[in-house]
Amino acid sequence: MDSESTSALRKVPEITLAFWVIKILATTLGETGGDALSMTLDLGYAVSSLVFLAIFAVAVTVQLSTAAYNRFLYWGVIIATTTLGTTLADFADRSMGIGYTGGSALLLALLLLSFYAWRRATGSVAVDAIASRKAEIFYWVTILFSQTLGTALGDWVADTNDFGYERGAMVFSAGLAVVAGLYLVPKVSRTALFWAAFVLTRPLGATLGDLIDKPVDHGGLAIGRFTASEALAAMMLACLFLLPQQNKRAI
C-alpha cells in the first residue's frame, strides 16, 4: 500500500459506539448552530449557507491536506457539514418553495448520485475501503449530502401534520434501533447499515435540536440557540477527550 493510501486510511476514525454518540451530538449542534445564524442573527438561509460553505471549504481542505487522523479536525469538518446541511436544507425546503417532500426527494437523489459516482470511481463506498485522496473526497461530499438530507427528513417528519419534535425523535430513534438489530444479521451489508445509521442520526439530531431551541408554542423548550450550541459543543469536547476515537489501523 502506498503512502497516500496509508494516510487516507489513518484519517477516518474507527466506527464504535463512541463514534455514534459524538455523531448525534454533532448533528444536534449542527441544527442549533445553523438556526442560530439563519434565525437568531436573522442572516437568512442563503447568506448563512454561504458562510457555512466557506467554513466547510476551509475545514475540508485542511482535512484533506493532513497526513494522519486528527479527532478535533475530523469532527470539526463533521460539524461544518451539519451546520451547512441545516441551512441548505432550509433554503431548499422554504426559500426555494419546493416544500419538505420536494426538498427531501431532491436531496435523496443527490445522495444516491454521490454513492453511484463514488462506487464507479473507486469500486466501493465502504468507509474501511477509503484508501486514496479521491475516495476521501467522495466520502466528504457524500457526508454533506447525507447531513443535508437528514435535516430535510427531520423537518418533514416533525412539521407534517404537527407530528412534533419529540415524536419525530422517537421515530428516528426507532429507525436506528432497527439498524442496530440488523447488525446482528451476518448477511446484511455492513456498509449499507453504516450509511443508513449515518443518515438517520442526522434527522434525530435535527429533531432534538429543534426540540431544544424552538419556542414553547411550537413544541420546543425555548432554550437559546447560542446557549444550546455552547452546551453541545462542550459535551462534544468532553467526549473527544474521554472516549477513544483512534483508528486502530493508524497504529
Image: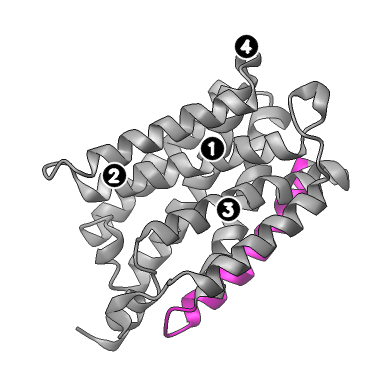
Rendered image: mark on residue 161: 4
Task: Name the foreground residue: 175 vs 113.
Answer: 175
Using the image, determine if residue 99 lies above or below residue 154.
above
Check if mark 3's residue and mark 2's residue have beta carbons within 8 Å.
no
Contact between labelled residues 1 and 2, with CB atoms less than 8 Å apart: no
Give the main secondary structure, helix, strand or loop, of the magenta stretch. Answer: helix
Q: Earlier in the sequence, mark 2 or mark 1?
A: 2
The residue under label 1 is which amino acid type?
Answer: Pro
Amino acid bearing label 4: Asn
Which contiguous range is marked in magenta? 45-70
Q: What is the CA distance from the residue labelled 3 to the residue labelled 4?
A: 27 Å
Q: Is residue 187 above or below residue 7?
A: above
**Camera-side residue: 131 or 182?**
182
The CA span between labels 4 and 1 is 17 Å
**Disc 2 element:** helix
Q: Which residue is mark 3?
A: 25
**Who is closer to the viewer here, 127 or 57?**
127
The percent coordinates of residue 168 (x first, y second) are 56, 26
> Does 99 appear in magenta?
no
